[in-house]
Amino acid sequence: MNIGVLSDTHNYLDPRIPHLLTGVDHILHAGDIGLPAILLQLEQIAPVTAVAGNTDDPGLAYPQTELVTLAGRKFLLQHIVNPHALTDQLQARLACERPDVVLFGHTHKPFCETINGTLFFNPGYAGKQRFQAQRSVALLHCNEKGLRHEYLPL
């Protein structure tokens, strides 16, 4: 199973994203989506699971966190996560849910590190160019041997 991962679109879907995510089985969006039209465009590629970010309008009622099982693995999505300083609430959720992967955004920086058996993964940011930072989306390739990530620059 191939999973497309992105975050921080900020109401802009780069025209290269549909091509980069062609053939994925599912898309995970880790927040700061923008308007629902972004999700509708992504749903033309594959089913989407998404969470709210700190800049998303609360009136849009995006969920704050989601747990989804794909390819036999649990993925927890939450926009703001500091893998090295987890909140008490997130620590409790991790202990209860025991996800294989925690996907997050917010920092606009790619991150991939396994901590206490859980992979913490940030795909970087996919919105319009800001701060001279490299923009990216990612793929997670899941099979019986494990999980492999691949960053795709925009």
Image: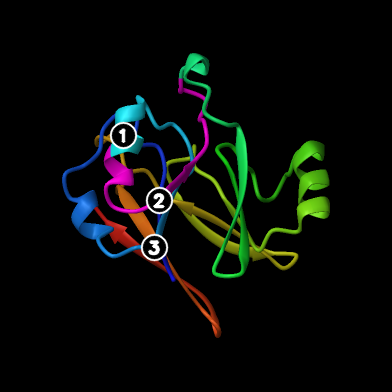
Cα separation, mark 3 vs mark 1, equals 18 Å
> In the drawing, does residue 86 fall left or right of residue 140?
right
Colouring method of the image = rainbow
Q: Residues within 10 Å of mark 1 (few under 14, many from 20)?
A: some
Q: Residues within 10 Å of mark 2 (few under 14, many from 20)?
A: some
Q: Residue at x 35, y 37 (%)?
A: 39
Q: Secondary structure at mark 1?
A: helix
Do the numbered discs 1 and 2 sit on residues whose CB atoms are within 8 Å? no
One can see residue 131 in this view: no
Q: Residue at x 61, y 66 (%)?
A: 73
**Looking at the image, which residue sits at the far top?**
59
Q: Residues within 10 Å of mark 3 (few under 14, many from 20)?
A: some
Residue to which mark 3 is pinned: 25
Residue 140 badge: none
Residue to which mark 2 is pinned: 47
Quarter of the figure with residue 7: top left
Do the numbered discs 3 and 2 sit on residues whose CB atoms are within 8 Å? yes
Which span of residues is magenta-colored? Answer: 41-56
Q: Earlier in the sequence, mark 3 or mark 1?
A: 3
Q: Amino acid at mark 3?
A: Asp
Q: Earlier in the sequence, mark 3 or mark 2?
A: 3
Residue to which mark 1 is pinned: 38
**Quarter occupied by the N terminus:** bottom left
